[in-house]
Image (cartoon, rainbow, N blue to C red):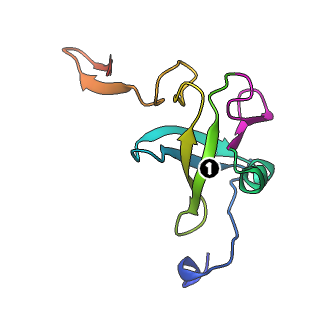
Amino acid sequence: MQKGDEESTVFAPRYDDNGLIPAIVTDAKDGSVVMLAYMNAEALRLTLETGEAHYWSRSRGELWRKGATSGDTQKVVEVRLDCDQDAVLLSVSLGGRGVACHTGRHSCFYRRVSRGSQRYELEII
């Protein structure tokens, strides 16, 4: 990225070597971070065109629309790119049960790292 590109109004997402860009997803209602996912160019295009969140599954190697099987959809309220256009921030309205995590929790970030007596541990919050 050239100096001054941070102020550009040209939409030019920068994907990594695998053709992916991280997407941080927040709940439009309260601003809480509910998940981190990845998008390829097609997922980002479909998200912008349909207003429904689409992602690239790294584990399955396929495109998916959030909520297609679970019913826990994400209607896009706003899409932002960071200063060097290599990360996406989605603000979404959560449909279905109002959850983002496949575990049925509101957020995928439901475990806090804490220091145990011998090692670091995860605490469910």
Relative to residue 118, is residue 22 drawn left or right? right
Quarter in which the N terminus is drawn: bottom right
Hey, which quadrant is residue 11 in on the image?
bottom right
Residue 6 visible here: yes
Tell me where residue 120 appears, x and y as whole percent: 29, 22
Horizontal side, residue 12 vs residue 7: left or right: right
Q: Amino acid at mark 1?
A: Val
Question: In x, y percent, where is residue 29?
Answer: 44, 45
| Residue 87 makes an appearance in the image | no
- Please give left or right for residue 53 compared with residue 92 in the image: right
Front residue (pair 113, 52): 52
- Nearer to the camera, 119 or 11: 11
Residue placed furthest toward the left: 117
Secondary structure of residue under mark 1: strand
Q: Which residue is mark 1?
A: 76
Task: Report the side of 109 relative to 77 (left or right).
Answer: left
Q: Is residue 64 magenta?
A: yes
For image coordinates 23% across by 14% down, the residue present is 118
Q: Which residue reaches farthest bottom? A: 4
Instruction: Classify 123 as above or below 14.
Output: above
Quarter where residue 123 is shown: top left
Q: Is residue 54 magenta?
A: yes
The residue range painted magenta reads 53-69
